[in-house]
Image (spheres, rainbow, N blue to C red):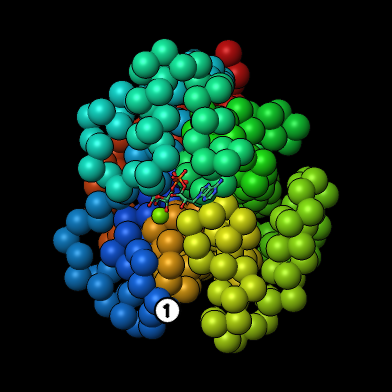
Amino acid sequence: MQDVQKEKLRLKFLGCLLGAAIGDALGARWEGRRMSRSEDIVFLAERLEQLIYTDDTHMTIGVAESLIESKGFDGEHMAQTFIKNYDAEPWRGYGPGPPRIFRMIKDGEAWYSAANRLYRGGSFGNGSAMRVAPVGLLYSRDLEKLREIAYQSSSITHSHELAREGASLQACAVALAVNTPSDEDIDKEAFLSKLQNFIPNQLYQEKLAQIKELLGEQDKAKVIAVLGNGIEAPRSVPTAIYCFLRQPQSYKDAVIYAISLGGDTDTIAAMAGAISGAYLGIDAIPPEWLAKLENKDYIESLAQKLWQLAICPA
Ligand code: AR6
Ligand code: MG
């Protein structure tokens, strides 16, 4: 790869992880609300002194740390990284499931089986899709490997098929965004077709078809009714992809629109922000938002190390 190509890729890696963290931190202020006006979200974003992220980013950091330290996926290492991070900052707003799984693993359950004991058939919450962006970045040039690692990283806490497929779909969207040059317009239909070819699950297939139908839709209530804005992976991952595809040329518009839909705003904005940042690169993120992000330098350093690993695998 030429140096100029490598540098463009670096900016995309930074844009993805920082874009996800900012989406999470901005969205967290609106979590659980109904629809909001874009002007109100922008107004609050301008007034906030600091952008404090939640479990979405905390776990994304864990995924990135583990992939970097292990030079690839190591389930035991990733599970222990999640546990270490959770023990240090349990107040980040974790969903109900993961802390229970961390306890089981601490008590001796294997990392690959603990999650099966939660809920019926494992969790289908969006907790494994919200943190999967580093997998999408690192394996963007090998979608079968990406699928396998997305499944496995999901299985640590979310073993239900809908969570595993949701995580792989989000990782694939990040990878396609990374692989599309930012000075090239996104072909929305081609982007959706590639996702449809990638995902075997029927429900996600239907959701991707609905995204296409909704691209010109002005009525947010209809978007929410069809795609959802909830905590379940199938009611949030397709929504995040939609938020990106609606306004692919503006990171700010994609994230603000995601938050304006209400519901699980931090997670949907984090996932939309990850895809948008991966396409447009860090330069598309408003500098005043970047400057206010908690632990920005650390998140940036993780993105940088992931990039180094991606261009020069061990
Ligand atoms: N059956 C019934 N309900 C379920 C099932 C199931 N098989 N699986 C999940 N749920 P959880 P997360 C419901 O606990 O995915 C933070 O706020 C159930 O109500 O695995 O890590 C983040 O910002 C369960 O409590 O947590 C994200 O928004 C819920 O889905 C979110 O939490 C969440 O599943 C991530 O949560
Ligand atoms: Mg959330």
Furthest residue in direction left, as rendered: 49
Q: Which residue is mark 1?
A: 35
> In the rendered view of the protein, which quadrant contains the C terminus?
top right
Residue drawn at the location 80% of the way across and 46% of the way down: 200
What SS does tag 1 mark?
Answer: loop
Can I make out residue 223 in this image?
yes
Depicted 188 relative to depicted 108: above or below: below
Residue drawn at the location 38% of the way across and 33% of the way down: 100
Instruction: Report whether 227 appears left or right of 263.
Output: right
Instruction: Report whether 293 appears left or right of 282.
Output: left
Depicted 266 relative to depicted 143: above or below: below
Instruction: Report whether 101 appears left or right of 72.
Output: left
Give the percent coordinates (x, y) of residue 6: 58, 35
Give the percent coordinates (x, y) of residue 156: 51, 28
Q: Nearer the viewer, residue 120 or 201?
A: 120
Can I make out residue 57 in this image?
no
**Amino acid on which disc 1 is placed:** Met
Furthest residue in direction bottom, as rendered: 218
Q: Nearer the viewer, residue 134 or 179?
A: 134
What is the count of numbered marks?
A: 1
> In the rendered view of the protein, which quadrant contains the N terminus?
top right
Residue drawn at the location 20% of the way across and 65% of the way down: 48
Quarter occupied by residue 81: top left
Residue drawn at the location 73% of the way across and 56% of the way down: 203
Give the percent coordinates (x, y) of residue 17: 44, 44
Depicted 208 relative to depicted 176: above or below: below
Does the residue tagged 1 have its C-beta within 8 Å of any atom of ligand 2? Answer: no
Give the percent coordinates (x, y) of residue 244: 58, 64
Instruction: Report whether 257 appears left or right of 227.
Output: left
Instruction: Categorize mark 1 by other alpha carbons within 10 Å: few (<14), some (14-19), many (20+).
Output: some
